[in-house]
Image (cartoon, coloured by chain):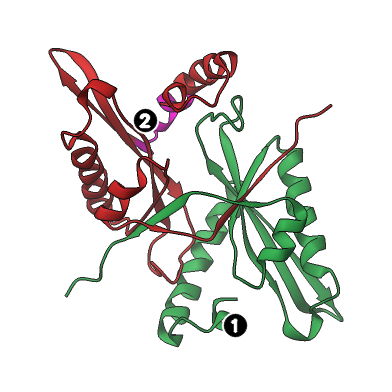
Chain colours: A red, B green
Amino acid sequence: MFAAMGQTQDSILDAMERNCVPWLTRMIVEGKYIGWITEEDKKPIASAGLLVLDWPPHPLDHAGDHRGYLLNVFVEPDYRRRGLAHALVDLCLAEAHRRRIRVVALHSSDAGRPLYETVGFRATSEMLYVEPDEA
Amino acid sequence: MFAAMGQTQDSILDAMERNCVPWLTRMIVEGKYIGWITEEDKKPIASAGLLVLDWPPHPLDHAGDHRGYLLNVFVEPDYRRRGLAHALVDLCLAEAHRRRIRVVALHSSDAGRPLYETVGFRATSEMLYVEPDEA
């Protein structure tokens, strides 16, 4: 997904991939990551995942103590415009509902935004601080 | 904080407060919430907290598996314009650094945004889905 977005060096992507395997394994074992992969002829063509985050009770969900985070939404270029991403996002939201998670966040690419708006996602006031690289 | 923002019913705020106590206790015990309260004459006048979230390795931090979330940043009205919030945010970022957390998120009110921009926070592409209330 990040390779397709084209803004990250290959060496960083390789390191990310290595580091993601133990992280994802741990999250799945702890019941905090639920992922879907769509296959055609045993070849993966699309994916999406739901991460369950600790989150304080909030005006948007005063009784909840978790928030969902939608990630790894990706469709191989040859399989786009067929509703695969929409179907996967619906699966993620249904899983969140099943777990009584009422609020789900994501970070959207420009290309993904119209789909997420259709489903009911809205822009937020989030801000991010990234520690500068050490000189 | 949410009461001061004035957009949430008192009954919701009461429920949130009740639900926050066990959540916060659990997070502190698990080492996932670190909070600061500024006092004057033993009276709390300002606060801030850092929540440690599970987060996958990402182009912004390819070796990390956590992200920080800054919350509960609040200064009592009589004590504003003295740099208390700025000092508390700096404490949170220093704690994140100590834990090798390189990316910290928050949701800003309009009033808070200039401070966060000064510190180095930037707007993101986050979107949020909130499950509709059942009829």
Residue depicted at x 71% and y 68%: B47
Residue B108, compared with residue A135, is above or below; it is below
Q: Quadrant of residue A107?
A: top left
Q: Which residues are magenta?
A: A23-33
Residue depicted at x 82% and y 79%: B42
Could you classify mark 2 by the number of other residues whose Cα lies within 10 Å: few (under 14), some (14-19), or many (20 or more)?
some
Q: Quadrant of residue A100?
A: bottom left
Q: CB of mark 1 within 8 Å of CB of mark 2?
A: no
Looking at the picture, how far across and down is residue A123, in whole percent? 43, 58
Looking at the picture, how far across and down is residue B128, in whole percent? 39, 56
> Quick one: SS at disc 2?
helix
| Foreground pick, B8 / A40 | A40
In the picture, the disc for residue A28 is 2
Q: Quadrant of the C terminus of chain A?
A: top right
Q: Is residue A125 left or right of residue B112?
A: left
Residue depicted at x 82% and y 76%: B81
Residue B12, compared with residue A96, is above or below; it is below
In the picture, the disc for residue B84 is none
- What amino acid is labelled 2 in the image? Ile
> Quick one: SS at disc 1?
helix
Q: Is residue A87 left or right of residue B9?
A: left
Judging from the image, mark 1 belongs to the subunit labelled B
Q: CA distance from mark 1 to mark 2?
A: 39 Å
Q: Does the segment drawn in magenta span residue A30?
A: yes
Residue under label 1, please give it.
Answer: B4
Could you classify mark 1 by the number of other residues whose Cα lies within 10 Å: few (under 14), some (14-19), or many (20 or more)?
few
Would you say the magenta stretch is mainly helix, strand or loop? helix
Q: Residue furthest left?
A: A41
